[in-house]
Each structure stands twice: as structure tokens, then as C-alpha cells.
Image (cartoon, rainbow, N blue to C red):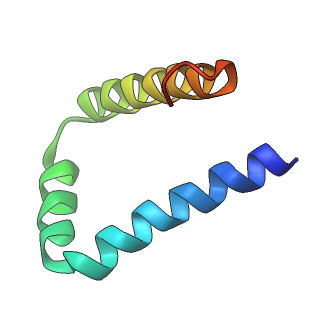
Amino acid sequence: MGFLILAIGLVLCVEGLVLALAPARLEEVLRAFAELPQARRRMIGLIALAFGVVLVALARRGLGV
């Protein structure tokens, strides 16, 4: 349970930092993202998911993260 709370906290820190430092740029990125075809957005999501799983696995093993 502590690991899940840590993960959620880290996500909130990163997203909060983006919103605090570059809100206008975030709006531009979201507009550009909305213009992508749904299949491309899905592929980006799957790649991000896979990358996240790899990072979590590395962190749990203690290999450099």
C-alpha cells in the first residue's frame, strides 16, 4: 500500500510542477495532442504504460532508479 501511495504522490508532484511552471505550454501540448488521431494517442498511451511498468520493475529491483 505504501508503494502505491508513493507512486501517486510522485505523479502528482510531476504534474503539479508542469502546471505551476508552464501552464500555457501545457495548453499548447494538449491542443496538439487532441489533434492526433485516436489510434496514435492510444499507441502513445501504450508505450507510456510499458515504459512505466519497466521503470517500476527497475525501481523494485533497485537497479539504478
Q: Nearer the viewer, residue 58 or 36?
A: 58
The answer to whether 27 appears left or right of 39 in the picture is: left
Residue found at the far right of this picture: 1
Compared to residue 46, the image places residue 34 above or below, namely: below
Compared to residue 18, the image places residue 48 above or below, namely: above
Q: Nearer the viewer, residue 7 or 28?
A: 7
The answer to whether 56 appears left or right of 30 in the picture is: right
Residue 8 falls in image quadrant? bottom right
Q: Position of residue 53 (x, y in %)?
A: 56, 24
The answer to whether 29 appears left or right of 54 in the picture is: left
User: Residue at the location (19% across, 75% down)?
Assistant: 22
Q: Position of residue 55 (x, y in %)?
A: 51, 26
Label total for image: 0
Compared to residue 46, the image places residue 3 above or below, namely: below
The answer to whether 52 appears left or right of 37 in the picture is: right
User: Residue at the location (56% across, 56% down)?
Assistant: 10
Q: Position of residue 24 (x, y in %)?
A: 14, 78
User: Residue at the location (42% across, 73% down)?
Assistant: 16
Q: Nearer the viewer, residue 35 or 1?
A: 1
Compared to residue 34, the image places residue 9 above or below, namely: below
Q: Position of residue 47 (x, y in %)?
A: 37, 23
